[in-house]
Amino acid sequence: MAVHVVETDVSNVSIAFAVLGGFIVIYGLGSYVVKEKLYLSEALVATTVGIIVGPYVLNWFDPYSWSSSAERTNEITYQFTRLVIGVQVLFAGISLPAAYLRKEVLSLFTLLGGVMTVAWFVTAGILYALFRPLSYLEALCLAAAVTPTDPVLANSISSGRYAEKHVPQAIRNIIVAESGANDGLGFPFLYLALYLLRRTSVDSGGSIGDEIWRWFYSVVIYQILLSCVYGALLGYLGRKTLRWAEAHGYVDKDTFFAYGLGLALFVLGTTGLFGSDDVLACFIAGNSFTWNDWYRIRTREQEMDSWQDNIDALFSTSAFIYIGAIIPWGDYSTGGSSLGIDPWRVVVMAIAVLLVRRLPAVLAMYKIIPAVSELKEALFLGWFGPIGVSAVFYITIALKQLPDDGSRDRLRALYTPLTLFMVFASVLTHGTCIPLAKLGPRIVKRTMSVTKTASRPVSRQPTVAETLNARRQREIEEKQEQAPAHEQDTSQGSPGTLEQAGESTSEASDATENGQHQQQSQAPSRLAHPTPDLTLPISRPASATLAAEASTSADAQHVNVPHTWYARAEAALQRELAAEQAEASKETSNGWLRQGLVAEADANHDSETASGAAPSTPGRVRFD
């Protein structure tokens, strides 16, 4: 009898999908706690997972095994990081306010021209001092990879509950704008060092002037300026055509909000066809696309900007799992000693780069950065200059462009391990500094509170429901006692009018046999027929929910509640719901969701009016 063996597909792609999908599924179960309670970034968690599943721990996910050729692995890394950064910087451009590049031109010029140049030279000096006999020109080539700030990590820093509460909007915007622009502007720094290195190699022999001229027309003109013009043109055309299609009803809602992703892929691909700076073109296209703030406001009104956040999260988690798996930990121990990569050297390098790479420059220049208004904002801006996916992107470019004649073998051997360790150090440091800043004062506060409460007995606090009910009843009783009788009849529709109607109804009910049913027929509440705006299916506040449940329970058990209290409770409930509905109406005043709800409420109200039927619950707003 023949034995049939079931074939399995244990391919690298299947393993990659399983690792990424498993992380998203498991992380999604506690993502709120991780981000909003522990303040840990997704990049830190994803990098940790990549290290665990990588070749040095579980060996489930090894990108180096995908190809026997180092050049092929480098090409895979290049295309993957290029896609991630291109999409991220275009979304960063879309997220900025209207005409932001024009309004903050001085701030961006100072950061991209002054701070970035200083960071390049300072980082090169640190590398030159720690890893001799590395020349200073080689150190400049290596430092160019970690000079730009990373848009993926910058987005995680500038968003979230902590950033919205503690970081001014101007600082968040300038961090996003700088990280989006300097990813593409890192090319001049890298290629200047590469062209000068090629001058001394076998396949070249030109003078320094020739190499600088070559750098000027091939990098500054062709890559930087051309990509800016091309990106601005595509962003402008995309904005005009999308607005025209939306005005004529040719585009549906889902495609409207997915347009940004398609634009990012189109700009990335077409710019790469003629060899210009596709990353910078994506950022300029994103800012040009939302130059008048139309697209950004529309996505925010309909709460569809979360769709872009989901795409960001998918790309960023994929990238940092990949980065965690390719960090060459073996090069920092025994294997790295021959290259001078001792553990203490890389640790000192990481600390020095994070501390002095850009912080002193920002502190020295923040007076000429209009987006920064005070010293503590300059400290925050100078400290949060993360190193991430963009550094890995520049590794792949440098390895393709370095001379392969054997003269730069040491630089080739040092480039990947040193840059990846700085990426890991930045992810670890910038991903944990906010939790540590929150944890320190909390520990001190709890320690002091323990000494104060140790000698007194612990009292059990009332529940939230008990507190709200007690507070509501106390407020109603105080208002009833303090309101004079002559003030209760001054205005129609006021609580005093409701109280008078309730008292007359209560007197009439004593002379009838139908009790509370007769009260409602003689003096119905003014709130028995709510307006259509108040019948929208809205989210009921906690205090309103408790009051409504208490009233419903009392009616069900035929408890004889004084009508004065009942009317006051109804009036307070309706005022609170009206305020809540007014706030919700502001947020969705022009959106599709608001229009649909208003139409539905009007239809329900018209049907009830035509049939002559009273609402099912007199004096209450209907909740769906």
Image: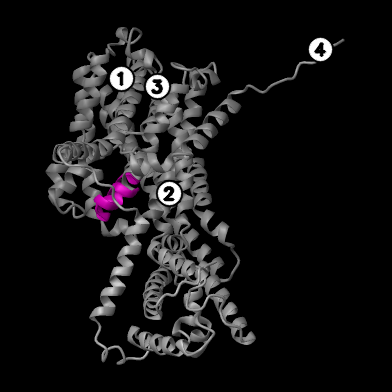
Of tags 4 and 3, the one toward the viewer is 4
Image: magenta residue range: 160-181
Residue at point 55%, 71% (across, down): 596
On-image quarter of the N terminus: top right
Of tags 1 and 4, the one toward the viewer is 4
Q: Which of marks 4 and 3 is nearer the N terminus?
A: 4
Residue at point 48%, 69% (across, down): 552
Spatial CA distance of label 3 from label 1 is 31 Å
Q: Label 3: state its secondary structure.
A: loop
At label 4, counting other C-alpha atoms closer than 10 Å, the crowd grade (few under 14, some 14-19, many 20 or more) is few
Q: What residue type is labelled 2?
A: Leu
Whole-percent x, y for residue 333 in the image: 32, 10
Inspect this view and state whether residue 278 appears: no
| Closest to the observer, 71 or 206 | 71
Farthest residue to the right: give it.
Answer: 1
Spatial CA distance of label 3 from label 2 is 27 Å
Placement of 174 over or under 219, stated as above or below: below
Color scheme of the displayed model: one colour
Spatial CA distance of label 1 from label 4 is 65 Å
| Closest to the observer, 525 or 364 | 525
Label 1 belongs to which residue?
A: 200
Residue at point 51%, 41% (across, down): 273
| Closest to the observer, 199 or 13 | 13
Q: What residue type is labelled 4?
A: Val
Whole-percent x, y for residue 473 in the image: 33, 69
Q: Which mark is residue 327?
A: 3
Label 2 belongs to which residue?
A: 90
Label 4 belongs to which residue?
A: 3
